[in-house]
Image (cartoon, rainbow, N blue to C red):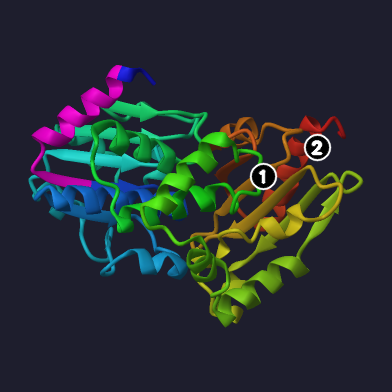
Amino acid sequence: MKSSDFQDAIELIDKSDNVLITTHTRPDGDACGCVVAFEELLGSMGKKVQTLFLSEIPQWYGFLFEQKPAMLDQDVSVEQLSEAGFDLIILVDVNSNGQLPGLEDFLKQNSKKILIVDHHETSDGLGDVELVDSTAAATGLIVLDLFRDVGWEITEKIATALFVAVATDTGWFRFRNTDQRVFRSCVQLIDAGADPPKLFRQLYMNITPERFKLMTAAANSAQLHFNGRLATQQLTRADFEQTGASYADTENVIDQCRRIAGVEVAVLLVELSDGRVKLSLRSTGAVDVSEIAAMFGGGGHKMAAGATLDGPVEKARQIICERIGKALGAV
C-alpha cells in the first residue's frame, strides 16, 4: 500500500454524497466494526449512507448498531441498489467476488467508484482505490490509520467499533497476528472511549442457549487425524434444526479444537441450507491454509482461511483431510 493511496481514498470520500458500505458474507467482528466506523464517520459529514449486509449479523455484534442494518434480498434488492444513486461503494474486509454472493453482478455492472479497505491476501482487484495491507492483523487497523492520517475525529462509537474489529480478529489478543501495532492502536482506541472489560462481556460472556447447544454438537463431532496433528468438527443441517441455532452462531466454534495439544490444523465443516459445505480452516503456521482454500476457490490468510465444497459433509471431510494430510507430509 503506497502513501498516495490514502490521499486517493480521501478524495473519493470527499467527492461522494451517497455512499453504500458493505462487507463479506457471514460478517465477523472486523467486518461489523469497520462498517460501523465508516457509517459513523460519513454520517457525521452529512453524507447519505446505506449499510448493507449479505447475510445475518451474529447477535453478539448487534450492540454496535443503533438500528438493525439492511440485509440483501431480505430488506433491499439488487434492483433497488441499482436505483439508489450511489456515487461511492466502500467494501471493507473483502476484495473477492467469492465473498460477495448476490452482489457480484451489481459490482461488475456498476459504473461508480469503489473503495476497498482490506487486509486479506486473496484479491480480485475490485476497487478503483484499494487500501490493502496484508500485514495488518485486522482491517480495523487500516481504517484507524486512514482516519488518523486525515485527522478525522475518533469518537467513542468509532473507537468501540474499531476495538471490536481488532480484538476479535486477534482472538482477543491471543493469535500470532497480535503485534506491537495492535497494542499501540488499541491504547489509542481505549483513550478515545473503548471499554475492553465491557466489550469482552458483550462479546464472549453473552451466548444464547441455542449457540451453547450448537457448540456442544460441534465438540461431540470432533475427530483427530494424522496422530492428532489435524482436528475436524462438523455441523449438519440437522444440528441447526435440533439446537435452534443459526449459521451466524458458528463463529469461533473452530477454536474448540485448536485448544487440543498437538493440533496443528483445525477444520470446521458446516453443511449449508443448499447442501454445500462451508470450510473454516485454522493453522498454527505449519500449513498455509490459504493455499489449500485457494484450491477450492476460497482464500484468506496463512493461518486462517475458508472455502466451500460440494456435499455431503463426510465426502467434504475426506477431501479436505487428504489435502491437509499431504501438506503435513502425513500422506
Question: How far across and down, in percent of the image, does residue 198 sit?
Answer: 49, 68
* Residue receiving disc 2: 325
Residue at the image point whose x is 67% and y is 49% from the top: 316
Quarter of the rendering occupied by the C terminus: top right
Residue 214 image label: none
Which amino acid type is shown beneath numbered disc 1? Arg
Q: Which residues are magenta?
A: 4-20
Residue 282 image label: 1
The crowd level at tag 1 (other Cα within 10 Å; few <14, some 14-19, many 20+) is many
The crowd level at tag 2 (other Cα within 10 Å; few <14, some 14-19, many 20+) is some
Q: Does 202 appear above or below 80?
A: below
**Relative to 3, 272 lies left or right:** right
Upstream in sequence: badge 1 or badge 2: 1
**Relative to 173, 43 lies left or right:** left
Q: Secondary structure at mark 2?
A: helix
Q: Can you see residue 297?
A: no
Which amino acid type is shown beneath numbered disc 2? Gly
Closer to the camera in the image, 202 or 99: 202
